[in-house]
């Protein structure tokens, strides 16, 4: 039986501004502006489906035009939709500023995502052998924290494996303990260096990896252009990043997860999982936008 992947997290539309020079504060800075569906769970679902895996997105959208953009994009990649429409709410939106180095700064408004409820979870579809991947934003938002934890517990009861991406170091730093309960439940943690440091209080990424591996069976720490490292049991593996011209780092971690999860769920060696994840991340940063591609309704 082929494993299916369920992705739970914020559903967003990204408005991306690419600038070629430092921002001119309180004045004008020329930019190239595009928009496309986004949100960590959306990005990972689309990359998984793009690569041929079965993916179902769990989340919430508003009853506005942006919702149509999201659903049309999911359909174009054959991502199964388990989305709840929150009446009178707007679909989540994120303003993304990408600087001259390709690094991004994000200004998110969760919108309808805050309205997702436990009863909206498609737990009747959960089955043994499938996998649930959770975005940390769901747990960091007080209004949806119970939804995320319920999903993790019900996935485990169904015999599924589970994983978590902490999502963002800055909001997590206000209360690192907010993820403690989730870390006791998951099988796999995929964090970047900053998130691993916040969770452990350890700056050195290898020491942070070892510390987290004492709490979660498999841990991955992403190191950007320095590659990635992982530990399962007491075995550590690492891989280099793939050299590529960086256009936009938005969604690189989401694409990384989409590359890592399929071989990991099959029990492949961590080095092979990391290598596949690096290929996926490299494809993401070489283009504008966080997903595999998006064709606007007018095209």
Image (tube, rainbow, N blue to C red):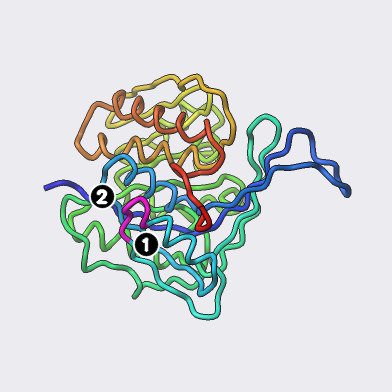
Name the residue: 64% across, 35% down.
103
Label drawn at residue 54: 2
Q: What residue did someone put label 1 on?
A: 58
Measured as percent of width and height from the top left, residue 202 is found at 53, 33
Name the residue: 25% across, 59% down.
155
C-alpha distance separating marks 1 and 2: 13 Å
In this view, 93 is above or below 45? below
Name the residue: 36% across, 40% down.
258
Instruction: Give the extent of the magenta segment.
Output: 75-80
In this view, 134 is above or below 293? below
Quadrant housing residue 126? bottom left
- The residue lying toward the viewer, choosing from 112 and 189, is 112
Identify the element where label 1 is drawn.
strand
Name the residue: 49% across, 73% down.
115
Quadrant housing residue 221? top left
Task: State whether residue 1 appears in this view.
Answer: yes
Task: State whether residue 177 appears in this view.
Answer: no
Instruction: Report whether 157 appears left or right of 192.
Output: left
Label drawn at residue 75: none
- The residue lying toward the viewer, choosing from 142 and 180, is 142
- Assess disc 2: are there few (<14), some (14-19) or many (≥20) residues with their C-alpha within 10 Å of its C-alpha: some
In this view, 111 is above or below 44? below
- Assess disc 1: are there few (<14), some (14-19) or many (≥20) residues with their C-alpha within 10 Å of its C-alpha: many
Measured as percent of width and height from the top left, residue 201 is found at 55, 38
Instruction: Report whether 149 appears left or right of 167.
Output: left
Quadrant housing residue 276? top left
């Amino acid at each position: 039986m082929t494993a299916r992947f369920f992705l739970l997290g914020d559903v967003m539309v990204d408005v991306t501004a690419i600038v070629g020079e430092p921002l001119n504060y309180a004045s004008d800075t020329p930019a190239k502006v595009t928009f496309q569906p986004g949100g960590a769970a959306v990005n990972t679902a689309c990359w998984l489906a793009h690569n041929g895996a079965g993916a179902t997105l769990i989340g919430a959208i508003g009853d506005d035009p942006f919702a149509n953009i999201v659903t049309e994009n999911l359909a174009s990649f054959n991502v199964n939709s388990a989305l709840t429409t929150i009446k009178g709410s707007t679909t989540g939106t994120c303003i993304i500023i990408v600087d001259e180095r390709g690094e991004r700064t994000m200004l998110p408004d969760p919108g309808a995502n805050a309205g997702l409820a436990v009863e909206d979870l498609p737990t009747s579809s959960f089955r043994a052998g499938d996998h649930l991947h959770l975005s940390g934003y769901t747990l960091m938002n007080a209004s949806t924290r119970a939804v995320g934890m319920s999903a993790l517990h019900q996935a485990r009861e169904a015999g599924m494996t589970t994983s978590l991406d902490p999502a963002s170091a800055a909001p997590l730093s206000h209360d690192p303990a907010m993820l403690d309960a989730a870390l006791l439940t998951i099988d796999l943690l995929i964090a970047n260096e900053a998130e691993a440091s916040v969770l452990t209080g350890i700056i050195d990424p290898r020491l942070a990896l070892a510390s987290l591996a004492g709490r979660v069976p498999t841990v991955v720490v992403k190191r950007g252009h320095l590659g990635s490292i992982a530990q399962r049991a007491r075995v550590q593996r690492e891989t280099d990043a793939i050299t590529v011209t960086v256009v936009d780092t938005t969604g690189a971690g989401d694409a990384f997860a989409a590359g890592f999860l399929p071989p990991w769920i099959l029990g492949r060696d961590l080095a092979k999982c990391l290598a596949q994840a690096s290929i996926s991340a490299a494809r993401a940063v070489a283009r504008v936008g966080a997903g595999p591609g998006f064709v606007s309704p007018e095209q």
